[in-house]
Amino acid sequence: MNVKTLGQFVIEKQADFPYAKGELSRLLRDIGIASKIVNREVSKAGLAEILGETGDTNIQGEKVKKLDVFANEQFIAAFKAGGEVCAIASEETEDIISIDSEISKTAKYVVAIDPLDGSSNIDVNVSVGTIFSIYRRKSLSGPGTLEDFMQRGTEQVAAGYVIYGSSCMMVYTTGKGVNGFTLDPSIGEFCLSHPNMQTKKDGLVYSVNEGNYLHFPDGIKKYIKYCQEEDKATQRPYSSRYIGSGVADIHRNLITGGVYIYPCTTKSPNGKLRLLYECNPLAFILEQAGGKASTGEKRIMEVDLKELHQRTPLIIGSANMVDTVMDFIKKYASQTA
Ligand code: P6P
């Protein structure tokens, strides 16, 4: 079988970056290694006695699952050992982790990561995911700083996610398209399975937690009703698919077409998802796959990051569907203003 592993692919694509000396390639491979270790534990969580909660709460005030802690530790260890990053920002840690070691002295990158997104689904055997975003450092040398992360999503050099589902897949972009790799456990390698992923301009799926309907802005309420109307020309009603694990919902919609919406609500006035290590990397991937990602008013990747764990509303997926949601928001925002 003509198998191309992640390692082979990354080196092959390195030629796309004339000045690349392999640092980004090694960093992507480090992420692959940590992901395989996390996948091993996630796939046997029920047996590994690491289910359930540590009793701690993370900086989001959410109960921390032991696998969250394990995944965070694995990625941090991989980045420290690889020597390619000078600082890490993680959903699991309040402040950045600056790396000040001999091996990282010449590190060019910083990485922001959500080590295990959707972890509330772990105990019920629903897919969860890792989301990562890589920037060039802005500081000149030494340990990375908070300032190194204060960049727009348009400055990302690479972004990706790993989905721990019926199979383990890594999907990433370096700005030259999106490629998907499926873990072959028999050889312990991520193998290219979804080359040059492109999403549909229109889909027939909408993903939103309709339990929050009463708290949605009018434009979102009207869009949800639009999705539910009978209209043969636009193949409505659409299907409602919401897993409660963003990586799983957004991955499905990337493949089938569709739109995922987590708007601002009265409970979450700035939205729930985090700009730095959830929305920007997912936006980079969807845009590279021909989709769109918006706050409802502007392009996600053009939002200025002012604080590490900043939240934002997110509308992401098929370009025409994102545009339609934005039209509804604009139309009804003016009416409610
Ligand atoms: P709710 C997981 O906590 C997450 O950040 C996303 O992965 C997911 O889509 C969303 O929150 C689920 O949130 O409020 O619908 O349970």
Image (cartoon, rainbow, N blue to C red):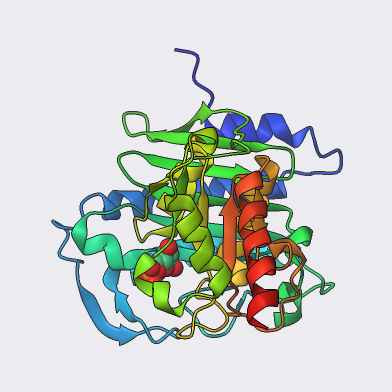
Question: From what the image shows, is residue 159 above or below residue 337?
Answer: above
Question: In the rendered picture of this protein, how many numbered marks are placed on residues?
Answer: 0
**Residue at (32% x, 78% y) in the render:** 64
Provide residue 93's location: percent of width, then percent of height: 49, 80
* Quadrant in the picture for the C terminus: bottom right
Q: Is residue 82 visible?
A: no
Q: Quadrant of the N terminus?
A: top left
Closer to the camera, 39 or 156? Answer: 156
Which residue is nearer to you in this view: 37 or 156? 156
Q: What is the x, y in percent for residue 117? A: 42, 63
Q: Quadrant of ligand 1?
A: bottom left
Instruction: Tell whether 85 sits left or right of 45.
Output: right
Asked whether the viewer can see residue 30, the reply is: yes
Give the residue at x 70% y 76%: 334
Task: Identify the image quadrant of residue 13.
Answer: top right
Within the image, what quadrant is residue 105 found in?
bottom right
**Residue 218 rendering spot, x and y as whole percentages:** 54, 73
Residue 116 position (above or below residue 319): below
Q: Which quadrant of the structure image shows residue 141?
A: bottom right
Name the residue rendered at 86%, 43% in the picture: 19
Tell me the residue at 49%/44% (across/down): 253
Residue 156: where, in percent of width, then height? 73, 58
Left or right relative to 211: residue 112: right
**Direction top: furthest residue:** 1
